[in-house]
Amino acid sequence: MLNLILFGPPGAGKGTQSEKIIARYNLIHLSTGDLLRSEIQAGSELGLRAKTLMDQGLLVPDEVVIGMIDHKLRDHRDAAGFIFDGFPRTVKQSEALDELLATYDQSISVMIALVVDDSELLSRLLNRGKTSGRPDDQNEELISKRIHEYNSKTKPVADYYQQQGKFVPIEGIGEIETIFAEINKAIDSVTSK
Ligand code: B4P
């Protein structure tokens, strides 16, 4: 089973590359950002709570996203593998994910981290904000807040997987296809072991 984490700051291209990885490796896509946005659209209580935080560029509580992932893992017991996109975003979420996977005798195979500098992130997200309608993509202050949340709470997640020997950084600036080719190489070197 291939269990892959796609990691990187907001706007690094996680959503973009996930789509291509899923098509090639037949994995189930678990994007906590997408799951939260569908809760918001459904107008659920969870969605309403999440919206207030997401609109401020803040992370939603660990318990909320861990619960969502737990449900999705249970729904897809027969999957060939999972791609975790935008999760885990805190060390607490990483520890919870390891524990959840262990209950299925599974573990993370590899973390692929897209490396992109802050000025490129800002320009990509402002650009996406023109068409996405996402409130969190529409002003510079909010995007900087998300990058700050990433640097303070999410970056330590990379160290967590580095200590397990599972961390693979990949240059995230350049042609989407070139980046995808590098991701493929990293995945194939794990699956051929
Ligand atoms: P997410 O939905 O995860 O989204 P993201 O980090 O904003 O973007 P992503 O990296 O997927 O960028 P994309 O490929 O689209 O998070 C949104 C919010 O949800 C968070 O701020 C937080 O509040 C909450 N949340 C989610 N998960 C959580 C968790 N686990 N815990 C707590 N809170 C959580 O790319 C961005 C743009 O760049 C696109 O327009 C794309 O076209 C462009 N692009 C991509 N690759 C490119 C390339 N190579 N060159 C040029 N442009 C490129």
Image: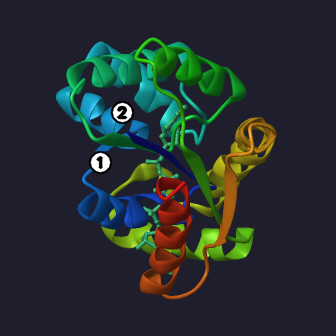
Q: Residue at x 54, y 55 (%)?
A: 190
The quarter holding residue 82 reads top left
Q: Secondary structure at mark 2?
A: helix
Q: Secondary structure at mark 1?
A: loop
In the displayed structure image, the side of residue 109 where residue 130 appears, left or right = left
From this view, report whether residue 167 is shown above or below residue 75: below
Which label is found at residue 189? none
Q: Nearer the viewer, residue 133 or 150?
A: 150
Q: Position of residue 105 (x, y in %)?
A: 45, 19
Q: Position of residue 171 (x, y in %)?
A: 66, 75
| Extreme residue toward the front, this view | 193
Question: Which quadrant is the C terminus positioned in?
Answer: bottom right
Q: Amino acid at mark 1?
A: Leu
Q: Residue at x 48, y 64 (%)?
A: 188
Residue underneath mark 1: 27
Q: Is mark 2 within 8 Å of ligand 1?
A: yes
Residue underneath mark 2: 36
Q: Residue at x 39, y 66 (%)?
A: 16
Q: Residue at x 57, y 39 (%)?
A: 56
Q: Pick whichever of labels 1 and 2 is earlier in the sequence.
A: 1
- Distance from label 1 to label 2 (Cα)? 20 Å
Task: Tell me if mark 2 has few (under 14), some (14-19) or many (20+) residues whose alpha carbon lies within 10 angstroms of its own.
Answer: many
